[in-house]
Image (spheres, rainbow, N blue to C red):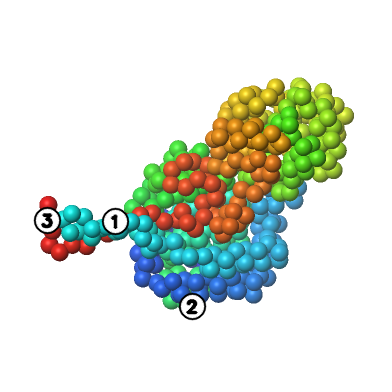
Amino acid sequence: MRMILYYFKQATMKPVLPLLIKTHKAAGKLGELSNKQIQLALRDLSKELVEQMDTILRANAKDLSRQNPDNPKNDRLILNEQRIKSIAASIKKIASLPDPTGRQLESKVLPNGLKLEKVTVALGVVGAIYESRPNVTFDIAALCLRSRNAAVLKGSSEAENTNLAAVALMKKVLKKHGISVDTITLLPSAREVVDDIFTATRYIDVLIPRGSDSLIRYVRKNSLVPVIETGAGVCHVYVESAADLNKAVNIVVNAKVSRPSVCNAMDALLVDAGIAPEFLRRLGPELAKHHVEIYADSGSHKILKGYPYLKQAVREDFGREFLRLACAIKVVSGMEEALEHIDRYSTKHSEAIISEDKKSCERFIRSVDAAAVYSNASTRFTDGEEFGLGAEIGISTQKLHARGPFALEKLVTEKWILRGNGQVR
């Protein structure tokens, strides 16, 4: 821990370029490591994380002590024994996943005798800018190591002590297994550092922002390094006229309250006018148990009159990612209005329809443009672990390179290899 603190303090007193150069050089060596060497390092990291849990928890407690205890976003920052064991289990699972590099995608002999092959290779150096969540530090570092990428991490000041302790532990494990400690680099949390990241096109191959919509937009607007967007989610659940209302209540409550501070939580509920009175009267008491604030349009506001946490919605409430126990509700005339509303306000993350009409479900699935589209299930399943992909760097909401859970399989690119015997053109 003392070593990483010294390194961190030194980094804040000089440009980050020397750190990026070291990481770039370390990335070039990762292809020389054996698969077994990487797997052993990750399994050892999983073990060390549990054994050194107290160190991580003390650092996390220091970060939490600086926050407003009533801030619902603290849920993203908090680590406890259960969460650390879950992170450790995830790292162990990543170690067991197949090496995504070196897979042969194509092989043929050209008419001139050249032997052509296309294989998967690491991206190189993966940069990540993210907010609060210290688990992301472990997830990104482990995924990058497994895919033979080096990682440049820029966390937020809220999680500074936790991230320092996490990276110190990782560097200890890397050194033990003969892997360059520069493979994982934690940059200072100061905001000024991002300008150095944005222009580091020679040393960072791809940049991934994970956090609020404002963070993602800022990175996309200012970075010269290619950006893969993840994180922002304004997720809708549409309860169609043919919905099973009991099923719908359970799904909506789960989508909103199971973990409200994450990107796959429901932010807006759309209800077909024909079933709105009965459905909302059933749903209201269940949301009230969890003190969910409801921002209701005029139609749903009349039905929910008397709900203890009811507010009149304004237009902006339907494009909000609440990240807390709050949601917007709108009564719609049918499928057409629901689709138009989602097209207008969706961030293309996760959208769901609840209906027993299979034709309506299939129309919704075909029409909605999002990374994940559900019928009769909670949006909370949009997650690499839940999809069987292992941990993820985030949920990509764009269409190039990766879409949906940005997991191990997407941390590679392609290389063409040609073997000849003197051919010239």
Within 10 Å of disc 3 (Cα), the crowding (few <14, some 14-19, many 20+) is few
Which of the labelled discs sits on residue 416, or is there none? 1
Q: Position of residue 13 (x, y in %)?
A: 46, 58
Tell me the element at label 1.
strand
Which of the numbered marks, if any, corresponds to residue 424? 3
Mark 3 touches mark 1? (CB < 8 Å) = no
Viewer-proximal residue, 102 or 285? 102
For the residue pair 270 and 164, the one nearer the viewer reads as 270
- The residue that mark 2 highlights is 176
Q: Earlier in the sequence, mark 3 or mark 1?
A: 1
Question: Please, what secondary structure does the residue beneath circle 2 have?
Answer: helix
Q: Is residue 298 visible?
A: yes
Report, in whole angstroms, how far the alpha carbon at label 3 lies from the one at label 1.
17 Å
- Residue 347 seen in this snapshot: no
Q: Position of residue 57 (x, y in %)?
A: 68, 65
> Where 8 sits versus 338, above or below?
below
- Depth check, front residue: 407 or 305: 407
The disc, 3 or 2, on the residue closer to the chain's N-terminal end is 2
SS under mark 3: loop
Distance of label 2 from label 1 (alpha carbons): 34 Å
Please state which amino acid type lies under the numbered disc 2. Lys
Marks 2 & 1, CB-CB < 8 Å contact? no
Q: Bin the neighbour count of mark 1 within 10 Å (Cα to Cα): few under 14, some 14-19, many 20 and up.
A: few
Residue 167, relative to residue 276: is it above or below? below
Q: Nearer the viewer, mark 3 or mark 2?
A: 3
Q: Amino acid at mark 1?
A: Trp
Left or right: residue 279 versus residue 344 is: right
